[in-house]
Amino acid sequence: MPNKDNSNLYLGRAAQLLVVSEFLLHKWNAAIPEVDTGDDVFVVKDRIGEFKRIQVKAVHGITTKYGYSAKFTLPYTQAITPITPELVYFLYVRLSKEWGRYLIIERSELHKYLDPNTIGTYNQKKDTVQLYFAFHPLKIICKKVDFKIHESNWSLFPEL
């Protein structure tokens, strides 16, 4: 059923602008494409000409006894198809009044997790994969795999 108040559109756009502002603070130039064909943000390190494509996903988290959980839906074909320059996912969780923890993961790295069907639930009809994350205080679990190393992982975007 469609969301009548379009709150998911607002959430997605807010996360996209949050990502742009973070890139600017990390001294990367960022731009939102005029036409969204799968890339939400383009970033470039001006001095060296390094270019990356960014896909932003944002969801509302659900409070649990251990912290919170979140479910992300990604286009499966996009997640398994190599492309140059590489796509990087930014997965943001919105709690009731603030942003929660977030993941930064390169498409090729995510594909390694998906390849042996270790994580995610594939929907062939929609060609999507759903990823369920449990955000514990010291770990981030998706089907017994700890994604903590991808939390706020800006190592893909070093400052010069």
Image (cartoon, grey):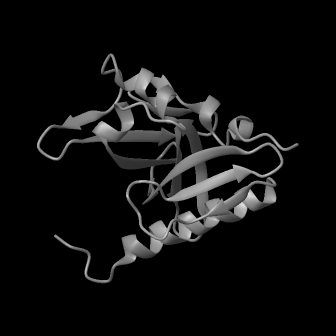
**Image quarter in which the C terminus is found:** top right
Q: Residue furthest top?
A: 116
Identify the residue shown where x is 60% and y is 61%: 99
Which x, y percent locates residue 21?
70, 65
Tag count: 0
Q: Residue furthest bottom?
A: 5
Which x, y percent locates residue 93?
51, 55
In this rendering, is residue 87 above or below 11? above
In this rendering, is residue 121 above or below 95? above
Identify the residue shown where x is 37% and y is 48%: 71
Which x, y percent locates residue 53?
55, 48
Identify the residue shown where x is 29% and y is 38%: 76
* Image-quadrant location for residue 116: top left
In this rendering, is residue 56 above or below 138? below
Which x, y percent locates residue 59?
43, 58
Report whether 9 appears left or right of 77: right
Identify the residue shown where x is 60% and y is 68%: 17
Report whether 44 appears left or right of 95: right
Q: Which one is in front, 59 or 39?
A: 39
Q: Residue furthest right?
A: 160
Report whether 149 appears left or right of 53: right
**Image quarter in which the N terminus is found:** bottom left
Report whether 100 appears left or right of 38: right
